[in-house]
Amino acid sequence: MGSRTLSPFIGIRIKPFTEDLKSRGVRTLDLFLTALLRETGGRLPENFVVTLPKVTVPDVSSSCLTLDAATATLQAMHLQPGTQTRAPSDACPVDTVIGQSPRAGTKVARDSLVALTLVSEPASITLGDYTCVTYSSAKSQLEHMGLVVVPGPLVPPLPQCPNTNKVAAQNPAPGSQVKPGDTITLSTGEQASPSPSPTGSPTP
């Protein structure tokens, strides 16, 4: 600039630009641009580029973070959540983050998008005991977990819940491991047969 000539390629790269050094980086950029504009009559040269340093993608997929918590973590690093997909998993609760792309530790440009994978449902389910629960209630609960419910054959009612609209047997048994889409058979108690009427004494 002292000879009033410029290189055909000119620019500045700010490094680092972490939170603790951001103010210093901005001041350096301000001083550079002020001096440059003073020497060039207030015009930036063509193809002038300011290159900001890349940021490191944080880990938001190994701690079962909620979407809000993962978003806040990404935004603190000047990144944004991108496409969201869902997958079954037993590693974390439903609606928490179990995957990300790019992976943690990757260097990317500021304001880049990070795709997230959230838990849609458990990959396996420990089947509860639905005996003595009304058929409609048990069916609703099981279908809410992604299971398929079919009625089974009538069986003798259980002594503790003889009502015929309550589940008296189930297959698979309580405690079994099942997956969404599996079929659960529920049987209700059958109506007890009426006792035969006593017959009269024969007429001599």
Image: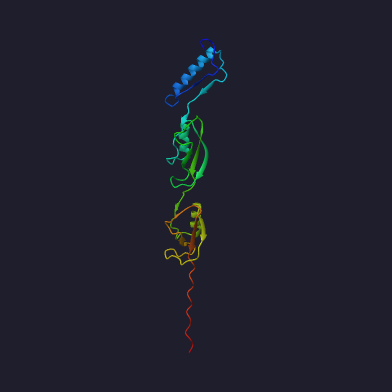
Residue at image coords 48%, 63%? 187
Query: How does the figure colour the protein chain or chains?
Result: rainbow
Measured along the vertical axis of the image, is residue 24 above or below residue 189? above
Q: Quadrant of residue 4?
A: top right
Residue 45 in the figure: left or right of residue 53: right
| Residue 133 x/y as whole percent | 46, 59
| Residue 72 x/y as whole percent | 46, 35
Question: Which of 78/57 is in front?
Answer: 57
Q: Residue furthest top?
A: 3
Q: Residue furthest front?
A: 8
Residue at image coords 53%, 12%? 39
Measured along the vertical axis of the image, is residue 189 above or below residue 57? below
| Residue 105 x/y as whole percent | 44, 34
Measured along the vertical axis of the image, is residue 43 above or below residue 198? above
Count of marks placed on residues:
0
| Residue 35 x/y as whole percent | 50, 14
